[in-house]
Amino acid sequence: MSNLLKPPSQDNSQRFISTPLGELLTQPPAIEPQQRFLNLFQRCANEVPAYQHFLASRQINPQQIDDYQAFQTLPLMAKADYMRAYPLPERCLGGSLRCADRVAVSTGSTGQPTFWPRSADYEAEVAVRFEQVFKDSFQADQRSTLAVVCFALGNWVGGLFTTSCCWQLARKGYPLLVATPGNNKAEIFRVLRELAPHFEQTVLLGYPPFVKDVIDAGAAEGLDWAQFKPKLVFAGEVFSEEWRSLLGQRTGSEAVCFDSASLYGTADGGVLGNETPFSIAIRRWLAQRPDAARQLFGESRLPTLVQYDPSSRFFETHDGTLVVSAENSVPLLRYHIADKGGVVSFKEMWDFLRQRGVQSVADLGLPADFQPRNLPFVYVFGRADFTVSYYGANIYPENVTVGLEQPGIVVWVTGKFVLQTQETLDGDKYLHIAVELLPGIIADTSVANKIAESIRDQLLRLNSEFANYTPVERQLPKISLYRFADAEYFPAGVKHRYTRR
């Protein structure tokens, strides 16, 4: 039973509850982030058995890692050679689970579940990300708010993690009631009808395609979304700004940069960063300027763009992918999360914008008196293997998505699709896209043709490789239309994959 004792201190939780958000984000840290994580390294080298063996097996003397330059030479942690190579207790501080009081489970691409013990104390740092969204975007410190958790509940990280952080906001004094129907639409609608009229605003938190399903199905059942003053919190998937605008239209949003926010999170590291009104405004500006986006991010697709606190989650890059360090029950030190992306400092972002004529936040469509927080940015594309190669061009799901979100197309489709390359009997390659129709929609060949033309037009606009590598006669994709929740391509109840080999 000794391994199940609660954590010895609640310093982070007490600090979160007693300290206003402005102070949490603007107070000079007691030590600089680089030094903090150098100190964490020394602690792990002394107190984490798995990390001691990990270093020894690579002939690394911890005493020689005495500055940040040396820290940057440390080997990268990964799931294969660290998380799956050592027993769970040996990866924890003290070689024991006694400092954890809860557990989350993630299932990666291999299907093998990984357990991530956590504690309320470490979770308090993640709650700051939720507070940023609820205060800076939603003004939930001043408005009575119903938070409806639409992530799946159970051991999976999203639902209970989100619930716990929202409870911490309520403990801090936010006028917030948290409802947990999970991903049960009937329960979500029951909660909304009964409770939402009693609050000034309602926040839906969930996986983007599911939140859209909730909004569309709710409208079909007669819900007047605008009366609830809905706000949306997403996690788990990159989406386009056209998609954000579409949901804003369907929910009656009057300030799109303030009415939704995406979280960048992982089961292993918690929430690593969050969208802010500033990052959303920048992303929307870039969405209209593909060339500028390509210069900043190096690709034609638009990544998720969030701001983060380097004293809480410390990012580095390795060969175009992200590496993070974080203090958790299972500490992460230069952990290779394998997401493709990069880091941009606050100053670098402003320099980039000013070189292209943006002189103030008003030029981005934000109120002139809006003050963005001085926090760095991290951008993330997601896993690099979710692409299809076609005539040497990398075709990204994000590019196809924009084609399905054009006016005139969105009235037919859910936004889900499966992208793949196929061959004719003559051996000619073509781009095939299976598209899911909205419930009750019966479509014909003319609809498929219009969808194909919309996707081709957006690929030509957004993807320079497609425009330059693909022969003109091969640029129009073949569209197959499938009924809602088709068992082969769009089965209900499972996380959707947008590409197929």
Image (spheres, grey):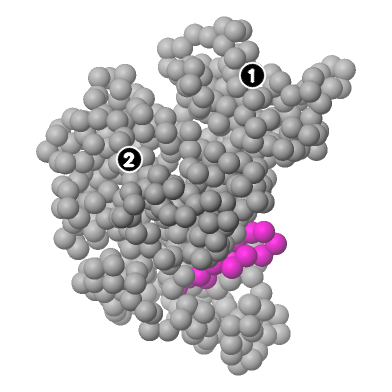
* Picture coordinates of residue 249, whole percent (x, y): 36, 29
The total of numbered circles placed on residues is: 2
Residue occupying image coordinates x 51% and y 66%: 347
Image: 136 above or below 145: below
Q: Main secondary structure of the magenta part?
A: strand
Q: What residue is shown with label 2?
A: 255
Assign the N terminus to one quadrant of the image: bottom left
Residue, x 25% and y 45% (percent of image)? 147
Residue 275 visible here: no
The tag on residue 453 is 1
- Estimate the x, y position of residue 416 in percent, counting from the top left: 52, 28
* Disc 1 secondary structure class: helix
Residue at 50% across, 70% down: 314
Q: Is residue 162 left or right of residue 473?
A: left
**Which quarter of the rendered picture does the C terminus lie within?**
top right
**Which is more toward the observer, 31 or 187?**
31
Q: Nearer the viewer, residue 271 or 135?
A: 135
Q: Say which quarter of the image contains residue 395.
A: top right
Residue 207 at x, y percent in the picture: 42, 41
Location of residue 141 in the rendering, given as x and y in whole percent from the top left corner: 20, 55
Q: Residue 235, relative to residue 119: is it above or below?
A: above
Q: CA distance from mark 1 to mark 2?
A: 31 Å
Residue 439 left/right relative to 501 = left
Range covered by the magenta-colored residues: 314-328
Q: Earlier in the sequence, mark 1 or mark 2?
A: 2
Q: Are there few (<14), some (14-19), or many (20+) residues within 10 Å of tag 2?
A: few
Amino acid at the residue labelled 1: Glu
Q: Secondary structure at mark 2?
A: loop
- 175 or 267, which lies in front? 175
Crowding at label 1, few (<14), some or many (≥20) Cα neighbours within 10 Å? some
